[in-house]
Structures are given as C-alpha cells and as structure tokens.
Image (cartoon, helix red, strand yellow):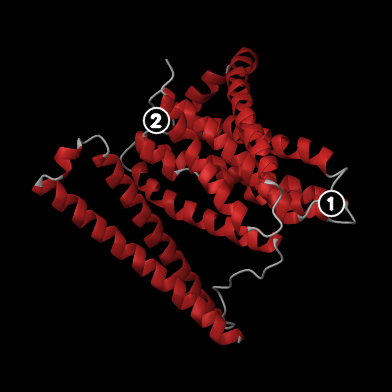
C-alpha cells in the first residue's frame, strides 16, 4: 500500500517553492497553468527514468556500456569514479535536462501561438517543470528508501537551478520580436551548461563513496549549489527587467581580485554552513523525540547548530559588505 505521507513529503516542498516564485513575479501566469506545467514536469521525470533504463539496455547491446565503465575504472583509478562521470555526462545529464527542456518547449510552443508570453512567464514555466520533475524524483527516492526526507527537502530547488540557464535563454528567445539564429544557438549552449552543472553536482555528491581522498570534493558541493542558486536569482531578476545585484564593483585589478576572493570565501562559508546543518538534520532524524532531550545529544545539536550558524552569519556579513561597497560606488 502506498504511504500517503511519503507523497506529501515528495510533493509539498516543490509546490511551496513554486508558490514562492509565483508570488514574487508580477504579472505571473494563472496558477492553474503553472500547476499544469508542474504536472508535465512530473511526467517528464517518469519519461527520463524510462529513457535512462532503455539507454543502459541499448548501450550495453551496442557498445558494451558496462565494459567501457569498468575499463575506465581500471585504467584511471582504483574505483568506478570515471565510469560514474561518463554516466552522469552522457546518460543522466543529457536525458534529464532534455526531458525538462521538452516539457517546457512543447506546451510553450502552442501557448505562444495564442498568447504574448513575457520572459518572466516562460522562466516560471521552466521553474514549474523543474519542480514537478523534483516531486517525481522525490517520490522515487522516498518510496525506495534510498534518501532521507531532510535530504530530499533541502534538494528541492536543485533541478530548477540546473535548468535556469536554458530557461532564461528560451524565455528571451520566445519573447523576442526578432528571433535570430544566434539566439537559438544560445539556447543550446545554455542547455549544455545545464547538463555539465547537473553532472558535476551529481559527481560531487557521490565522491565520498569512492575513496577518502576524493571525499574532500564533497566540500565543494554546497558552495557550488549556493552559487547556482545565486545564478537562478540573478536570471530571475533579468527576466523581470530588474538590474542584477552587483558584488564586484571595484575597477582596479587588485581590488577586483580581492572582492572575487571575498565572494569565493563567502560561498565556501555559506555553502558548508548549509552542509553542516544538512548533516546535523540527517544525524538526528532517526532519533526518537525522547532521545532529543538527552543532555549529551541536546548539547551536540546546540553546539553544531551554533557553529554552522556562525559561519552562515559570517558569509552573510561578507555579502552585505560587498553590496554596500557596490551601492556606495554607484550611488
């Protein structure tokens, strides 16, 4: 029997995030239309799952796909990491981003024949499809007990962050009066960027499963995700016609390098503060409520929370400093 609570945990976080973006965008499309794209995203997730399974079967039949991955593992590292990299790039990233792109492109093609679509509308369609894809993926992971509820909840915006570049390029192309060939090429380049980012995030998330040395790569995962979230927010501002937020404002090369270093430092601090809270949530989620009030566990939770909060506040202070410097320079 299907556990209804798992369906709620799979669907509600993506729907809440969709509502958050819906209320942030002026002149947003009707909510029912966004829910239609959300459903299309869930269907595209099922399609991607089937295509990935078929890809493995056909690739094994044509080129001995498993043999190629084993050969890469033997010839490069004492692990299967190179095979995993190949799979993430050629199979997972291409198929999943391709299915999401089709899930936005096909219905948008028919809608734009009747309606004049704003760039922000098409971008919201992209976010809706990506979040629907996330809901389907959440359900698969939770139903098969291969991921935790905190883990799937914190990864809710990830597919939207993957798809943001091609969503922006598609939004600008569809809303443009003069659709040039170079604009179509920009969609392909942005989609390829999404495929690479998608594969890189998946590789960083599984790096700890191969060797202790590669485990250090996982500390780059959440800073990279934080940067992608920042990119999503910047692209959302651009499709609404708002100026992007400037952090690098100095003109001299030395000062610009200093500010870039501060941005990188803030990403590392903020990203790993989120990573620390994620690990903390994973550690305490299996515990019973009575165990949480044990003095040792309570102190562990409190100390880890304060430590990660300190790093997060420090990253936020660096961000506010850079924004204040940019405002002081331009105004």
Estimate the x, y position of residue 47 in percent, counting from the top left: 64, 25
- Near mark 2 (Cα within 10 A), the count class, few <14, some 14-19 or many ≥20, is some
Q: Residue furthest left?
A: 295
Residue, x 43% and y 48% (percent of image)? 221
Whole-number angstrom distance, CA of label 1 to CA of label 2 = 52 Å
Q: Residue furthest top?
A: 61
Residue, x 70% and y 62% (percent of image)? 240
- Near mark 1 (Cα within 10 A), the count class, few <14, some 14-19 or many ≥20, is few
Point out the image quarter for the N terminus: top left
Q: Nearer the viewer, mark 1 or mark 2?
A: 1
**Residue 29 relative to residue 305: left or right:** right
**Residue 142 relative to residue 109: left or right:** left
Residue, x 63% and y 28% (percent of image)? 43
Q: Is residue 188 above or below residue 240?
A: above
Estimate the x, y position of residue 274 in percent, counting from the top left: 37, 53
| Displayed quadrant of residue 143 | top left
**Residue 105 relative to residue 48: left or right:** right
Estimate the x, y position of residue 260 in percent, counting from the top left: 50, 70
Q: Secondary structure at mark 2?
A: loop
Looking at this view, is 59 or 183 the one in front? 183
Residue located beneath label 1 in the image: 116
Residue located beneath label 2 in the image: 79
Q: Is residue 301 above or below residue 15?
A: below
Q: Residue furthest right?
A: 178
Q: Secondary structure at mark 1?
A: loop
Looking at this view, is 121 or 255 the one in front? 121
Q: Earlier in the sequence, mark 1 or mark 2?
A: 2
**Residue 60 relative to residue 190: left or right:** left
| Displayed quadrant of residue 42 | top right
Point out the image quarter for the C terminus: bottom right
Residue, x 47% and y 55% (percent of image)? 226
């Amino acid at each position: 029997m299907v556990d209804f609570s798992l369906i709620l945990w799979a669907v509600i976080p993506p729907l809440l995030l969709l509502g958050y973006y819906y209320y942030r965008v002026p002149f947003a499309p009707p909510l029912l239309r966004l829910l239609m794209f959300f459903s299309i995203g869930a269907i595209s997730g099922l399609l991607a799952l089937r295509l990935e399974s078929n890809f493995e079967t056909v690739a094994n039949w044509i080129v001995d796909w498993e043999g190629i991955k084993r050969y890469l593992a033997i010839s490069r590292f004492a692990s299967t990491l190179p095979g995993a990299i190949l799979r993430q790039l050629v199979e997972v990233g291409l198929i999943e981003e391709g299915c999401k792109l089709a899930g936005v492109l096909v219905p948008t093609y028919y809608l734009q024949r009747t309606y004049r679509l704003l760039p922000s509308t098409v971008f919201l369609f992209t976010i809706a499809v990506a979040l629907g894809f996330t809901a389907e993926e959440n359900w698969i992971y939770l139903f098969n007990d291969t991921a935790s509820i905190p883990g799937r909840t914190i990864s809710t915006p990830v597919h939207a962050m993957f798809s943001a570049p091609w969503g922006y390029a598609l939004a600008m192309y569809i809303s443009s009066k003069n659709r040039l060939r170079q604009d179509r090429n920009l969609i392909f380049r942005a989609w390829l960027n999404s495929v690479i980012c998608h594969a890189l995030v998946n590789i960083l998330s599984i790096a700890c499963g191969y060797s202790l040395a590669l485990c250090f790569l996982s500390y780059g995962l959440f800073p990279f995700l934080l940067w992608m979230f920042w990119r999503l927010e910047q692209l959302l501002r651009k499709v609404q016609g708002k100026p992007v937020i400037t952090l690098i404002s100095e003109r001299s090369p030395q000062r610009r390098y200093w500010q870039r270093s501060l941005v990188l430092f803030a990403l590392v601090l903020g990203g790993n503060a989120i990573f620390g809270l994620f690990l903390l949530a994973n550690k305490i989620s299996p515990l019973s409520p009575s165990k949480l009030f044990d003095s040792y566990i309570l102190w562990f939770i409190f100390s880890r929370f304060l430590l990660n909060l300190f790093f997060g506040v420090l990253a936020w202070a660096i961000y506010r400093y850079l924004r204040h410097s940019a405002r002081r320079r331009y105004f």
